[in-house]
Image: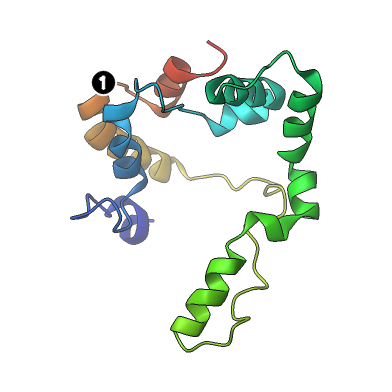
Amino acid sequence: MDELFLKRGRPKSIMNNPSYWEFLLSWWPNRNDPNVLWLWYEDMKEDHKATVIKVAEFLGYDCKDAELIDIAYKNSTFDFMKEHEVKFDEHTWKQHNNVRCSLSPDAGLNSSKVMNGGRHPKPKLSTETLTQLDLKWKEVVTAQTGFASYDEMRKSFSVFK
């Protein structure tokens, strides 16, 4: 974790694989922009339908259209995405890039962005790792945002507030 995750800092360009914290902070100046909606994975897992409604409202759709909301809800479930996983990857880009890189056109096409629906049991991080992550948060994120933790930031922006 130290070498691959915690030591990665701010790149020269945000497009050069920034750390999680730097990527998060790259959006911080735009947090109140009318065309930016901050969403949290935990909110979606906690109440998927409320999150779908929040996204629909943000995009200007009529949230009173129950049929439309139901379609969006169904089409954003893990089961739907797993059943149609080719629609949720970058196979078209891979095919073109493979040719450009002199690879077989089907190289890497058997992978999917839709994984297995979660890890069971979920791996537990050690106390030392959790401490390192907390220190990194405070060093990078708290300094710029004032939020002492991910949970504090999430509560501030949650769709359920």
Q: Residue furthest left?
A: 12
- Nearer to us in this view, 89 or 160: 89
- Does the rendering let one see residue 114? no
**Image vertical order of residue 150 relative to residue 123, above or below:** above
Q: Residues within 10 Å of mark 1 (few under 14, many from 20)?
A: few
Residue at x-position 68% and y-position 73%: 110
Residue at x-position 35% and y-position 38%: 24
Q: Quadrant of the N terminus?
A: bottom left
Residue at x-position 71% and y-position 24%: 49
What amino acid type should be assigned to the residue bearing mark 1?
Gly
**Image vertical order of residue 150 relative to residue 109, above or below:** above
Residue 13 as seen in the image, left or right of residue 15: left
- Does the rendering let one see residue 105? yes
Secondary element type, mark 1: loop
Residue 66 % position (x, y): 79, 19
- Nearer to us in this view, 122 or 63: 63
Residue 16 as seen in the image, left or right of residue 50: left
| Location of residue 36 by image quarter | top left
Residue 46 % position (x, y): 66, 25
Could you tell me how many numbered marks the image carries?
Answer: 1
Residue 16 % position (x, y): 29, 58
- Nearer to us in this view, 36 or 40: 36
**Image vertical order of residue 86 relative to residue 95, above or below:** above
Residue 12 as seen in the image, left or right of residue 153: left
What residue would you read off at disc 1?
A: 146
